[in-house]
Image (cartoon, rainbow, N blue to C red):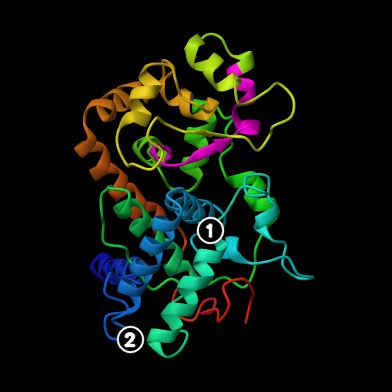
Amino acid sequence: MASSYSLVFLHVLVIMFSLTSIAFSDLSDDFYDDICPQALPTIKSVVEDAIRQERRMGASLLRLHFHDCFVNGCDASILLDQTDTIDSEKTARANNNSARGFEVIDRIKSEVDRVCGRPVVSCADILAVAARDSVVALHGPTWEVELGRRDSTTASRTTADNDIPTPLMDLPALIDNFKKQGLDEEDLVALSGGHTLGFAQCSTFRNRIYDETNNIDSTFASQRQANCPRSGGDSNLASLDPTPALFDSKYFSNLVSKKGLLHSDQALFSGGETDELVKTYSTNLRTFSNDFAGSMIKMGNIKPLTGNQGQIRVDCRKVN
């Protein structure tokens, strides 16, 4: 009898393992090789052209993918416009008058559908590939993007407000926020390193440069105050590190020097458990680049819609 129970239990384990394997193998880096081999080169071409026109666009496209994945998974929900039935994430606190690059995604979608002859590439996959190609165009690492995501038919501004990390978070809050997405402390530090690219608006760092004293270089604070007054100028920009259009390790060097622009940036080097990794990345670009690539793959696998779930949108801004 015991032997029979053991066999049944073993059979159940085999089934569970098989189902688990299927769940983790739904995405693959060769998903479009047969369906539309020109899809990825087309995305790369449009991204590179957009960055040639405006270097800042690379950071914007990377940020779109990040903000998409943190809200109910990597499903292109961030691209949906407001309608009677869609509560657009574009108006969430982290995205309103801040998220950008939507026109570039539109152009990519149009070009990809043209070369493929029909809409076979999801907007969610376009976001993931465009993020990778943006990093590469700005001299960062490359990685194999796993593909096969499908697009959501819903969006949630409320979830975006709750789940996208804010620039005011301290380290425990950041760790909890990333843990909710299945990401650990190394992922937190590596992905925060995406701030080696791009800019932030005055409203996101005003409190830090005027009200914080213990963990900020006073000269750095004064310099930033010149373009970010105590009142007004909310959309004035400051670079997140000294080389905002180059993927390097200066973001982390800044943190070690107490020159993190956002409170949430400096929180990574504030006497907590992430200090050592920040130090490592500040002096070892190769280690940071490798870890960043690995964490991007991991983030890109957050709750994708696959198989018959969701849809392949014809227009990334609206449900079919």
Label 1 sits on residue: 101
Residue at image position (53%, 57%) is: 68
* Circle 2 SS class: loop
Snapshot quadrant of residue 82: bottom right
Label 2 sits on residue: 35
Q: CA distance from mark 2 to mark 1?
A: 26 Å
Q: Nearer the viewer, residue 206 or 268?
A: 206
Residue 84: x and y in percent read 79, 70
**Residue lying furthest right in this view?**
84
Q: Amino acid at mark 1?
A: Gly
Residue at image position (49%, 26%) is: 171
Q: Amino acid at mark 2?
A: Ile
Which secondary structure type mostly characterizes the magenta part of the structure? helix
The reply to whether the magenta stretch includes residue 204 is yes
What label sits on residue 30 in the rendered view? none
Can residue 273 be seen from the camera position used here?
Answer: no
Q: Nearer the viewer, residue 85 or 95?
A: 95
For disc 2, the neighbor class at 10 Å (few under 14, some 14 to 19, many from 20) is few
Residue 37: x and y in percent read 28, 81
Considering only order in the chain, which callout, 1 or 2, is on the residue closer to the N terminus?
Answer: 2
The reply to whether the magenta stretch includes residue 147 is no
